[in-house]
Image: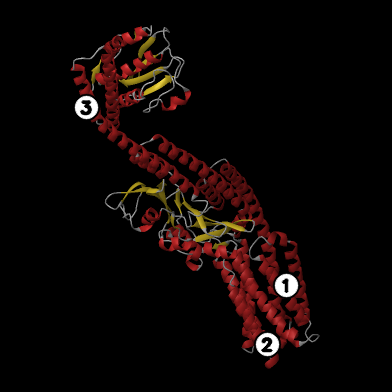
């Protein structure tokens, strides 16, 4: 005959069992706390323990505790079991169910304890609550179990909770149908079977939970080691100068490899939680995430939930989870997802999201793996950001140097605008960048990167460009992140090109980043604009000087011609003695020199404009050099200098204008004679073949070119302090004449004994 087990004995035994379960969870808490779910089971076991103790003390404590509070605690404990099951399987915990269950149980058990005392009703309610909650936990564990891999924990959970739910449901039906009464528990040991079996299931489930936790943590540790090693290499690569985009790709590749994800995205945020940069990868395809897409994800998607709760989230099936935001074109790529915050200390650096085309792919160990390595991921990203900022500064300095060189070396305004706009367009920091110069028709002429610009020729009195031109002040249109996301409107910056109080044009910069031109991000655009302004100002002054010079030269030709005519008439008049005749000859020589100077200036102007006719033909250089040297012999003999031609007779012909080549040689040989020391060594003219060009070299025996003149020796009006210096037009003419024929001239050796060299295209093909 079976012994009689009363309710108090049953409650005490169950309480002892749950006390042991609580103790085992406490001992293993260091490992369990990193997982989602065990904390809920710890709470449920504690509530069960307290409730069972209160049941065991019936008759010795107030009924409000033994009847009402004890039942409420047990029911709420079952609700925590449901929460823990969902969390372990990557589902939202369903806190609303727990709260609603607690409120309903408090009211119902209060009614049957204080208003209408009914032990059977309390037993039926308690059994029904437990059956419903544990049944829901069983259904969740069975239907949300993984399709692949170990499923022991889920199977044991589903069986244990299902068996408990059936036992409590049978108990409720039996008492509710009047088959037995609640008091029969005190007299029959069979009514102790359901609670005892439920307690046994709790023991089996807890043991399985601890075993699976140990296995998962072991796998996580191994995965962590692999992930940390890979992230360390990524961080080192970022520190060595890898771009931020490259680091994003590597981080995503590491995360997808270790979790088996099919795709991943990483959204980086700034200190204020605004989107900075993002990347989405799938297979071998990398796609940059725009501000609009990122804004939608951070507002509606799983990433939004992660940012708000600062914890990782798993979606086992996106079709059944409201936290997932569908993105057009990616429906087939995603059925399950895992998203985790990337934090550095208390600062949120970004959000990492992994996706897979099959449901239930991501497990608790995946979440734990990501959460345990977010600091390392943040470190790699911070390193990449620092390196990226350093690279941007270097690129900015290089770009500024390039624009400064264009402004310094070019004298034509159109050429400066074209080359500077081309240099700015090659920088990827800006979505659009262009230089706008006002034209006579009331519209801007744009040069640079203007792809997709709605108006290729905007009016000079409208819009941001018009305001910058009219006011001469910097104009900004820098929308917030919300505005960029909502309208796609870029950040814009318009900086006027000003020189000596005049506005010559506007440089416009556009970026897809919100608030892209706040200080100090506008420093580089302002410096670049100032560099272009200097070049355009210099070109404007040079053009004004050229126009003034040409006007003066043109106006001087008439008076000079008149003076020459008057001198010729005076020379024919009778009555001049020798003294008067010498004065007249000196006047004629000077006026001819002035006319030659004027003609030289005009000729240089025609060469610069490309309107001086160049007659190209095959020229035999040895004969031409000999002819020029013969003409220079009188001047050389007067200074006791020897002229030597070392030009080989078999030198290939060149394609050039013989008249211009002769004048180039006359200028260079004449300078060599003029500046060589009297009676010094010979002046040599040599030549050689240099690929497809033929090079001529003229060496003198003078003191050489002054150091301060060397960089500008081929510019107009550049003369030194040596005796016999000329007008400063000869070498400028040589440079323009050589370049007009497709060659280059240079000062090869500044001296002593200067060497000038120039080359011309050969008429014969270069030897292979």
193 or 88: which is nearer to us?
Answer: 88
Taking the spot 63% from the left edge, 75% from the top edge, the residue there is 79
Q: Is residue 206 left or right of residue 737?
A: right
Say which label, 1 or 3, has the lower sequence index: 1
Where is residue 664 shown, x and y percent of the image? 31, 19
Q: Which is in the foreground here, disc 1 or disc 3?
A: 3
Q: Is residue 188 left or right of residue 236?
A: right
Element type at mark 3:
helix
Where is residue 695 shown, x and y percent of the image? 35, 18
Task: Specify the farthest residue to the bottom.
Answer: 116
Residue 180 lies, with reference to residue 672, above or below; the image says below
366 or 343: which is nearer to us?
Answer: 343
Q: Quadrant of the N terminus?
A: bottom right
Question: Residue 649 appears in which quarter of the rendering?
Answer: top left
Where is residue 464 shown, x and y percent of the image? 38, 57
Taking the spot 59% from the left edge, 69% from the top edge, the residue there is 93
Element type at mark 1:
helix
Residue bearing mark 1? 46
Element type at mark 2:
helix
Residue bearing mark 3? 562
């Amino acid at each position: 005959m079976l012994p009689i087990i009363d309710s108090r004995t049953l409650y005490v035994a169950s309480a002892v069992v749950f006390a042991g379960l609580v103790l085992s969870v406490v001992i293993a808490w260091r490992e369990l706390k990193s997982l989602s779910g065990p904390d809920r089971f710890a709470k449920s076991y504690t509530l069960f323990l307290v409730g069972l103790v209160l049941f065991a003390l019936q008759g010795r404590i107030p009924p409000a505790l033994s009847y009402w509070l004890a039942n409420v605690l047990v029911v709420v404990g079952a609700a925590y079991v449901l929460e823990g099951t969902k969390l372990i399987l990557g589902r939202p915990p369903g806190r609303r169910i727990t709260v609603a269950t607690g409120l309903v149980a408090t009211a119902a058990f209060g009614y049957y304890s204080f208003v209408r005392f009914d032990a059977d009703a309390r037993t039926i309610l308690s059994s029904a609550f437990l059956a419903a909650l544990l049944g829901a936990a069983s259904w969740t564990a069975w239907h949300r179990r993984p399709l692949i891999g170990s499923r022991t924990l889920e199977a044991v959970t589903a069986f244990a909770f299902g068996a408990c739910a059936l036992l409590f449901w049978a108990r409720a039906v039996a008492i509710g149908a009047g088959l037995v009464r609640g008091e029969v528990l005190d007299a029959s040991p069979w009514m102790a079977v359901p609670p005892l079996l439920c307690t046994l299931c709790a023991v089996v489930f807890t043991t399985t939970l601890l075993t699976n936790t140990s296995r998962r943590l072991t796998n996580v540790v191994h995965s962590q080691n692999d992930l940390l090693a890979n992230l360390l290499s990524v961080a080192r690569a970022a520190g060595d100068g890898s771009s931020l985009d490259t680091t994003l790709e590597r981080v995503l590749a590491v995360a997808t490899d270790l979790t088996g994800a099919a795709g991943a995205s990483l959204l980086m945020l700034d200190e204020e939680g605004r989107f900075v940069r993002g990347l989405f990868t799938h297979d071998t395809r990398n796609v940059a995430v725009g501000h609009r897409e990122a804004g939608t994800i951070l507002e509606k998607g799983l990433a939004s939930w992660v940012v708000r709760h600062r914890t990782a989230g798993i979606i086992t099936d996106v079709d059944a989870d409201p936290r997932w935001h569908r993105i057009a074109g990616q429906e087939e790529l995603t059925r399950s997802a895992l998203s985790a915050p990337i934090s550095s200390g208390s600062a949120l650096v970004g959000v990492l999201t992994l996706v897979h085309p099959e449901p239930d792919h991501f497990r608790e160990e995946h979440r734990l793996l990501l959460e345990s390595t977010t600091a390392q991921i943040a470190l790699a990203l911070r390193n990449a950001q620092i390196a990226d900022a350093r690279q941007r500064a270097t690129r900015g300095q290089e770009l500024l140097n390039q624009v400064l060189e264009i402004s310094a070396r070019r004298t034509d305004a159109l050429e400066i605008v074209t080359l500077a706009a081309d240099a700015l367009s090659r920088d990827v920091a800006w979505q659009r960048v262009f230089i706008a110069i006002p034209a006579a028709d009331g519209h801007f002429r744009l040069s640079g990167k203007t792809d997709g610009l709605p108006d290729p020729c905007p009016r000079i009195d409208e819009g941001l460009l018009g305001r910058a031109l009219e006011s001469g002040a910097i104009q900004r249109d820098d929308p917030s992140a919300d505005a960029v996301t909502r309208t796609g409107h870029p950040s814009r910056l318009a900086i006027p090109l000003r020189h000596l109080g005049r506005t010559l044009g506007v440089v416009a910069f556009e970026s897809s980043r919100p608030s892209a031109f706040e200080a100090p991000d506008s420093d580089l655009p302002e410096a670049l604009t100032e560099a272009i302004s200097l070049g355009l100002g210099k070109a404007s002054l040079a053009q004004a000087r050229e126009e003034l010079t040409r006007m003066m030269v043109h106006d001087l030709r008439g008076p000079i011609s008149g003076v020459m005519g008057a001198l010729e008439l005076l020379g024919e008049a009778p009555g001049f003695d020798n003294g008067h005749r010498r004065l007249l000859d000196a006047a004629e020589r000077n006026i001819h020199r002035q006319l030659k100077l004027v003609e030289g200036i005009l000729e240089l102007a025609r060469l610069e404009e490309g309107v001086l006719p160049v007659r190209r033909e095959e020229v035999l250089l040895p004969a031409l050099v000999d002819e020029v040297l013969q003409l220079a012999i009188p001047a050389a003999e007067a200074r006791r200098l020897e002229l030597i031609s070392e030009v080989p007779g078999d030198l290939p012909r060149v394609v050039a204008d013989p008249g211009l080549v002769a004048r180039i040689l006359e200028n260079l040989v004449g300078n060599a004679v003029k500046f060589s020391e009297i009676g010094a060594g010979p002046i040599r003219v040599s030549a050689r073949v240099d690929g497809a060009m033929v090079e001529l070299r003229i060496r003198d025996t003078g003191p050489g070119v002054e150091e301060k003149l060397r960089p500008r020796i081929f510019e107009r009006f550049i003369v030194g302090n040596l005796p016999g210096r000329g007008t400063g037009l000869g070498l400028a003419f040589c440079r323009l004449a050589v370049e007009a024929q497709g060659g280059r001239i240079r000062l090869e050796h500044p001296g002593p004994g200067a060497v000038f060299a120039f080359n011309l295209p050969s008429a014969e093909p270069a030897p292979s």
